[in-house]
Amino acid sequence: MPVLDREPSKDLGGGDGLPKLPLPDLKDTLDMYLRCMKHLLTEEQFNKTQNVVKQFGAPGGVGELLQSKLVERREKKANWVYEYWLNDMYLNNRLALPVNSSPAMVFPQQHFRAPIDSLRFAAHLISGVLEYKTLLDARALPVDYARGQLAGTPLCMEQYYRLFTSYRLPGPERDTLVAQESSVMPEPEHIIVACKNQFFVLDVVINFRRLNERDLLTQLDKIVKMADSEEERLPPIGLLTSDGRTEWAESRSVLMRESTNRDSLDMIERCLCLVCLDDASGHDLSDTARALRMLHGGGLAKNGGNRWYDKPMQFVVGADGCCGVVCEHSPFEGIVLVQCTEYLLKYMIGSPSKLVRAASVSELPAPRRLRWKCTPEIHKLLSSSAEKLQRLVRNLDMHVHKFHDYGKEFIKQQKMSPDAYIQVALQLAYYRCHGRPVSTYESASIRRFQEGRVDNIRSATPEALAFVKAMTDGKLSTSESEKMEMLYNAITAQTKYTILAITGMAIDNHLLGLRDIAHELKMEKPDLFKDEAYFISNQFILSTSQVPTTVEMFCCYGPVVPNGYGACYNPQSDHIIFSVSSFHESPQTCSSEFIKALEQGLRDMRDLCNYRKSTCSLSKQRKDRTLETHTQTDSNWQSQTQQTAADLTNSQQPLPQVLVKTSDQNKTEAQSQASKQGRH
């Protein structure tokens, strides 16, 4: 039997009042694992895996022992999987953070007419950050409630309190997520401003008073002038943070030998966030170009050194209006990033810039440039980091596409879940491109539980495979009505697995827990976790996430394996925004081809739904006509038929547009719509 909480307490303020994450039944997880993997393996691979699973789950076997240890762990911990999951998903990962791990949120293109306009935007944004931080410090942020499947459940809020108080410290084998504890006498809060690859300390509290927007603008203007000074310019130390985690840990230990460098690192690691004032970098300001700029800065030649990737929140303000936020993912999930950035954009729309009214702090001290002592060894490390970042820049194949044919309203009219429908469309697109199904990751929030982060919805279901085969085999043997039934089956399977995942009963976290507790007990790794099928199950060639917004912006991230795709989507009422990424170095993948297949699949699925609708309408008309011939004259029958046709025509009205452009409209939108949910 799964291990559940009988009576969680009713206190909903943080995470303590929520139930503990349940522990699924061992047999249920093993059965589901086989069901998820059968159609992704050869017959020979599956037969071997079946035997391995049977042996692992045998009465009195290793599986039962490990399960009993997890039951004990669940009693002692607020969340039995959290540490295992955090290490496996992020802290043990040795890949560079940009593209591979850190997602970005791309803001609407800004139209700055003069250089001072971008600084005004940055000052206004910083004011919003300070307002939001005040809410966080007072624990005054309203509790989130679940939307979509099983709506209305309160959610754990702990991730929000790491937005501006944490830091990812690189380690030789494993990183550390450092969460700063507030002390009795906290030091004045500060932000680090990056400009021309230089780092400056911007104190936001001086003489116990928070700087107003005019003061912030004054300080930002000083920083830009200081950064322009050629003789003062220092090497682009931020590049080191873009390297692999082991390499950056080694470089950091070299930096730490000098006290000047230790002081600078300390100021960065304790800051609220970074604000990166980027130079303009090219005329291309398309969605795709802006997404690339957010993810990697364009390398050393552009703004790649104007970052510090270990900080959770880096707000980018480009002189050319290319703006957004890059986040280090280990402290929080995508929905927390969305909620924070939506608050900031709505704040900037809803509260006019306060550059004139407030009294200024007299004689503001100049912002301080962070100093670095660079030995020849550090210069060599910088060259190596710059080269690797440039390779990443060249390798990333990103395509941001707005699909305008329809959006989530059409899908809801079919009585289908928009998320499940889009996931099936992604399966169809991949199958059209590659002719096979693959392990797929869709993040599912488990914030219904204490310290809950995510589990995986395994979207490559047998039902989805049956549907995509029917849609692509080119045979006329499968009728439209049979395809429609297969689509319903695929969406039902996807929805059922989603509910399993968000209620803590999916398989990925459970298998991870069994694997890691065996390691903790210093046992030999069980055969289940040495089996080829387990490796295949964790090679997420399709890594997907729904990140919906109520403000005009979109999320993007890179693939998680060299031959994979990252597919982030933002469903709006009458359109869907897709950000698809892959790597140029993989001969198997191509983002633009994937987008083409995705568009075709979405149109085919719409046509299938419309065919069913028209068939149902015709069937209803025939039935109505049969009844009418018994009771009406020919003339009455004709007028009735014409009226029915007119009613059908009138019912096909255009869908309302939600994505808004103007400030006033955005403000109205912000007030009238609740936020939605979404990962990476």
Image: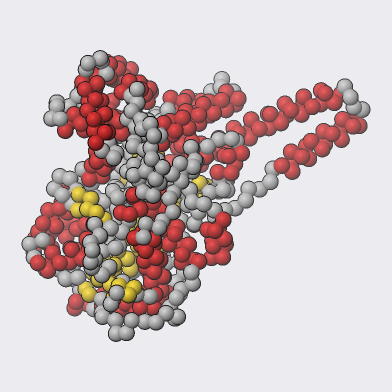
**Camera-side residue: 452 or 379?**
452
Q: Is residue 133 visible?
A: yes
Q: Is residue 106 left or right of residue 242?
A: right
**Camera-side residue: 425 or 59?**
59
- Residue depicted at 22% across the width and 16% down the height: 60
Instruction: Examine the rendered structure and indicate whether residue 439 appears above or below residue 549.
Output: above
Residue 225 in the image, given as x and y percentages of width and height: 29, 79
From this viewpoint, which residue is outermost toward the bottom?
363
Looking at the figure, which quarter contains the N terminus? top left
Q: Is residue 667 left or right of residue 356?
A: right
Residue 565 in the image, given as x and y percentages of width and height: 36, 41
Q: Is residue 300 left or right of residue 126?
A: left
- Residue depicted at 27% across the width and 61% down the height: 307
Q: Is residue 468 left or right of residue 102?
A: right
- Quadrant of the image occupied by residue 4: top left
Instruction: Examine the rendered structure and indicate whether residue 423 appears above or below residue 677.
Output: above
- Residue depicted at 17% across the width and 31% down the height: 519
- Quadrant of the image occupied by residue 239: bottom left
Looking at the figure, which quarter contains the C terminus? top left
**Camera-side residue: 369 or 70?**
70
Residue 431 in the image, given as x and y percentages of width and height: 43, 32
